[in-house]
Image (cartoon, rainbow, N blue to C red):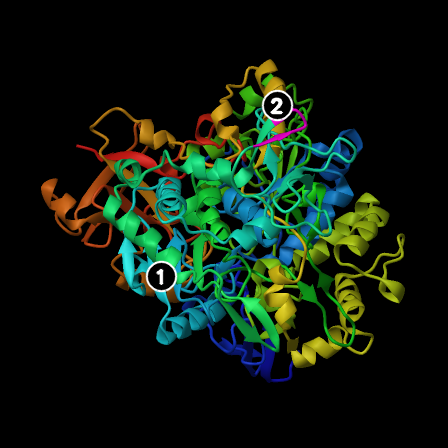
């Protein structure tokens, strides 16, 4: 790799994974910029991406395998690492893995970061081939995704959603920052959001803090943390009951709104087929929901069907939200009732129900409003109901995956014109409800798996609506595992790049769970706080020293939504790995062969990577990772476009079709405005839970959304008069980038990155001055200390802190001691997790300690 010039690749400093061009001179990387040939960034690149050069050449990089010599593990404890050879390291790791594989593969616990998307597929395939179901993405799952991704999947067949930036007229963001410097396809979305604002799209941001999205918005609506559902439910009440506005055609044909519901809360079903019934007003009697020539379907009223009184699900929804008046919501959320009525009226009016537009010769529904939610709204114990309630705003006006509305990230793809790959689309599943065409997590959002006695570390079998659970690192971990009779404990942990000490919750709690694991292996580029608990550290190649055939796959996760182009880029080394660094994917394959599980791995890879024809892997053949990548590319784009072609061109692009972007009008699938399945889930899960001593509250399993308080809302001690929350600083990604000197310099210049943001009037009332050192304390006695920044941009009852700062590792000399580790304030236990999907609550009541 001596040829100089511009090398196309992809960024790896956040999961946005924008396409880049890297300039190499005399074998040295000298500049990184965006790649204009790719839809993923369109030539734009943020400050993090530009600064990647400093991560590559960090003098504190791990360059050789390391082995622990100090048997004592703890926060701040020096592991006494000694350098060893790769053979020594892999001999020891293989021996440990073989032991648990032979005894019980479930004793392996796999943890990965969300920052580098290239590791997702190799780690998933390794875990599946090994036979362990115990895997998570540390705080990436607990904090930001369990609720939002579930709702995104149920309603949009996608991981997340954005406004249709080209056509939307009014977008309301609930704790989201899409298009404002963070998250999925961040740079493309930033340009699209800027263009939308220039075109005239109004942006309203509901958030406790007026930070990145709010700074660019037309209106900031301050709200107490964790109360988004109360606001959304009150808006629904105004829209449905005061204004009498809804999209009847959409609700009747694209949702379960017309399904008849009996007195027990379940669907009234056809005796012969078991399918839900609807009331056909033309025929004057009930018919199956999928009757081909069905007439006008009733959304309101009450009917005698099969000997019971039945009502359409929509009628139950309208009645249900009557209790959630704007005045009620004001008391909970602090948003004035008059503002709630105005926002609801504007949303209903701007939806322009009944309007259409012609695109590419096709007449399509036009609903130019979108309610968007993400980490801020969903990072709570009540994440499911928060996101469910917000999503119903889109559903009742028909603004889902239509022109101008809320668009999922690419739920439909009909593939490259020459090969028809990748190809996927949603389809109708049980009861006609939508099943996603592709997905990211091990099981689909729908149909819901049957709850069962839990056999995994997360207890996930009992909570099939969740992806990850608190028990992977909780205070009551051992107690819960014992209650449910988990027959094993983790004996080996395989970690890739995650730093759960900083990203999950209280670090003392997490440290105790790590201390109990006998052997921990960690792939990383630097030594972090997590390394203090590792027995072996393996030097990973950075994203600029590695290759990957699928950094932006699947498209529902991280590819621009809306019209434009499809792009499939690759990652390739800009410079060769220095020292003894090796790509983690290649090391995992060597472990596969050492463990004798190549046949299992290749079988998983054939399915996961969708390899077919001559490109399928022979079960017993030990393919190097580069060849597996080559086969995936050829399988999708033809024999002429393998890894060599992509190394030269960097990306392949082709135009999107209207049927892919605005697919809702073309596919016969429905989504649930009434969660009938939740009743059955509760009925089956509750006996298992209560039989093992777990507290259970049926209110969390109501088929219609409600506001449920977070633990912080139930703190009675008035001394704790502030709500604390953390936010994603656009200058940083998780805990990964604080060591980068360019980003650190920008953070030190920024008044927010390393401080505690407190409302100026509140601070003055407490006698505080800007820049003063203060200690914040939770009702559980957790404390953090930092400098106050007095500002008008925070709710008067709140403090906001940039997430995942506060490093203490001596091996991170730039990051150490800067910022505030908010997560130390978070309790990690059953009481602070969702009893529906296991999401961890991330807001906490605080006081300024004397």
Main SS of the magenta segment? strand
Task: Please state the horizontal and vertical placement of residue 378, each as a whole percent of the image.
Answer: 45, 44
Q: Secondary structure at mark 2?
A: helix
Write the residue at 64% across / 84% down. Answer: 3
In what element is the residue under mark 1? Answer: helix
Disc 1 or disc 2, which is closer to the eye? 2
Residue in the foreground of this view, choosing between 837 and 737: 837
Q: Quadrant of the C terminus?
A: top left
Disc with the residue nearer the chain's start (1 vs 2) = 2
**Magenta span has 355?**
no
Residue labelled with disc 1: 744
- The residue under the point 56% across, 83% down is 26
Q: Write down the region rendered in magenta.
A: 303-308
The correct choice, above or below, for 779 with respect to 523 in the image is above
Q: Residues within 10 Å of mark 1 (few under 14, many from 20)?
A: many
Quick check: 191 left or right of 573? left
Q: Nearer the viewer, residue 438 or 85?
A: 438
- Examine the rendered structure and indicate whether residue 179 appears above or below residue 706: below
- Mark 2 is surrounded, within 10 Å at the Cα level, by few (under 14), some (14 to 19) or many (20 or more) other residues, namely few
Based on the displayed image, in which of its 4 quarters is residue 630 positioned?
Answer: bottom right
- The percent position of residue 138, horizontal first and vertical second, equals 53, 43
Q: Quadrant of residue 96?
A: top right
State the residue position of label 2: 683
Expressed as whole percent of the image width and height from the top left, the position of residue 484 reads: 62, 20
The Cα–Cα distance between marks 1 and 2, rounded to whole angstroms, is 52 Å
């Amino acid at each position: 790799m001596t040829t100089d010039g511009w090398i196309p690749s992809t960024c790896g400093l956040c999961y946005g994974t924008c396409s880049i061009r890297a300039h190499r001179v005399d074998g040295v990387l000298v500049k990184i910029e965006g790649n204009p040939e790719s839809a993923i960034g369109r030539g734009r690149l943020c400050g993090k991406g530009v600064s990647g050069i400093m991560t590559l050449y960090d003098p504190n990089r791990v360059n050789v395998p390391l082995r622990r010599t100090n048997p004592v593990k703890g926060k701040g404890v020096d592991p006494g690492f000694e350098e060893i050879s790769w053979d020594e390291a892999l001999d020891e790791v293989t021996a440990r893995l073989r032991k648990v594989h032979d005894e019980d593969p479930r004793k392996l616990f796999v943890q990965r970061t969300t920052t580098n998307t290239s590791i997702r597929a190799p780690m998933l395939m390794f875990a599946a081939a090994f036979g362990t179901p115990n895997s998570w993405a540390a705080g990436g799952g607990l904090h930001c995704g369990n609720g939002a991704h579930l709702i995104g999947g149920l309603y949009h067949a996608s991981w997340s959603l954005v406004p249709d930036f080209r056509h939307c007229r009014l977008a309301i963001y609930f704790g989201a920052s899409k298009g404002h410097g963070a998250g999925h396809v961040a740079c493309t979305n930033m340009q699209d959001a800027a263009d939308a604002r220039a075109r005239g799209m109004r942006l309203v941001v509901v958030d406790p803090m007026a930070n990145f999205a709010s700074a660019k918005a037309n209106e900031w609506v301050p709200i107490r943390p964790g109360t988004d559902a109360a606001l959304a439910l009150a808006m629904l009440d105004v829209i449905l009951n005061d204004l009498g506005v809804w999209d009847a055609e959409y609700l009747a044909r694209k949702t379960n709104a017309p399904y008849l519901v009996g007195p027990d809360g379940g669907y009234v079903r056809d005796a012969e087929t078991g399918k839900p019934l609807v009331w056909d007003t033309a025929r004057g009697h009930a018919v199956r929901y999928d009757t081909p020539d069905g007439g006008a379907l009733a959304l309101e009223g009450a009917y005698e069907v099969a000997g019971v009184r039945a009502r359409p699900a929509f009628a139950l929804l309208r009645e249900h939200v009557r209790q959630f008046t704007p005045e009620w919501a004001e008391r909970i959320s602090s948003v004035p009732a008059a503002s709630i009525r105005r926002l609801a009226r504007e949303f209903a009016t701007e939806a322009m129900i009944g309007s259409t537009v012609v695109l590419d010769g096709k007449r399509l529904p036009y609903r130019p409003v979108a309610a968007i939610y993400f980490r801020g709204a969903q990072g709570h114990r009540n994440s499911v109901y928060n996101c469910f309630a917000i999503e119903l705003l889109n559903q009742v006006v028909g603004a889902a995956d239509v022109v101008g509305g809320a668009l999922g990230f690419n739920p439909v793809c009909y593939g490259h014109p020459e090969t028809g790959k990748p190809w996927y689309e949603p389809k109708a599943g049980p009861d006609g409800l939508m099943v996603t065409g592709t997905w990211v997590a091990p099981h689909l959002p729908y149909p819901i798996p049957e709850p069962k006695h839990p056999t995994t570390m997360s207890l996930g079998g009992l909570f099939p609506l969740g992806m990850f659970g608190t028990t992977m690192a909780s205070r009551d971990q051992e107690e819960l595992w014992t209650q449910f009779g988990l027959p094993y404990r983790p004996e080996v942990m395989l970690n890739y790049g995650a730093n759960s000490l900083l990203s999950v919750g209280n670090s003392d709690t997490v440290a105790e769970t790590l201390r109990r694991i006998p052997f921990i292996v960690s792939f990383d580029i630097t030594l972090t706080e997590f390394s203090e608990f590792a027995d072996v550290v393996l030097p990973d190649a950075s994203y600029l020293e590695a290759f990957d055939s699928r950094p932006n796959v699947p498209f529902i996760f991280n590819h621009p939504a809306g019209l434009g182009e499809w792009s499939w880029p690759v990652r390739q080394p800009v410079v060769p790995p220095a020292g003894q660094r090796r790509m983690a994917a290649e090391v995992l394959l060597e472990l596969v062969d050492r463990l004798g599980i190549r046949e299992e791995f290749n079988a998983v890879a054939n399915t996961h990577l969708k390899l077919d024809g001559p490109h399928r892997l022979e079960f017993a053949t030990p393919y190097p990772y580069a060849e597996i990548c080559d086969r995936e590319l050829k399988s999708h784009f033809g024999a002429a476009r393998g890894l060599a072609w992509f190394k030269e061109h960097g990306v392949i692009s082709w135009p999107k079709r209207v049927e892919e972007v605005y697919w809702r009008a073309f596919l016969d699938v429905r989504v649930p405005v009434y969660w009938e399945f939740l009743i059955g889930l509760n009925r089956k899960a509750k006996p298992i839970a209560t039989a093992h001593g777990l507290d259970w509250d049926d209110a969390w399993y109501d088929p219609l959304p409600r506001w449920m308080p977070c633990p912080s809302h139930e703190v009675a001690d008035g001394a704790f008069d502030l709500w604390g929350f953390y936010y994603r600083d656009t200058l940083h990604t998780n805990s990964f980038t604080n060591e980068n000197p360019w980003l650190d310099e920008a953070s030190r210049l920024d008044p927010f990155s390393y401080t505690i943001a407190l409302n100026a009037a509140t601070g003055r009332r407490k006698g505080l001055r800007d820049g003063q050192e203060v200690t914040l304390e939770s009702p559980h006695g957790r404390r953090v200390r930092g400098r106050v920044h007095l500002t008008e941009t925070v709710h008067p009852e709140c403090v906001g802190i940039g997430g995942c700062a506060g490093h203490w590792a001596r091996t991170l000399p730039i990051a150490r001691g800067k910022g505030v580790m908010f997560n130390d304030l978070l309790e990690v236990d059953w009481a602070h997790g969702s009893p529906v999907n296991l999401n961890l609550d991330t807001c906490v009541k605080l006081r300024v300690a004397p």
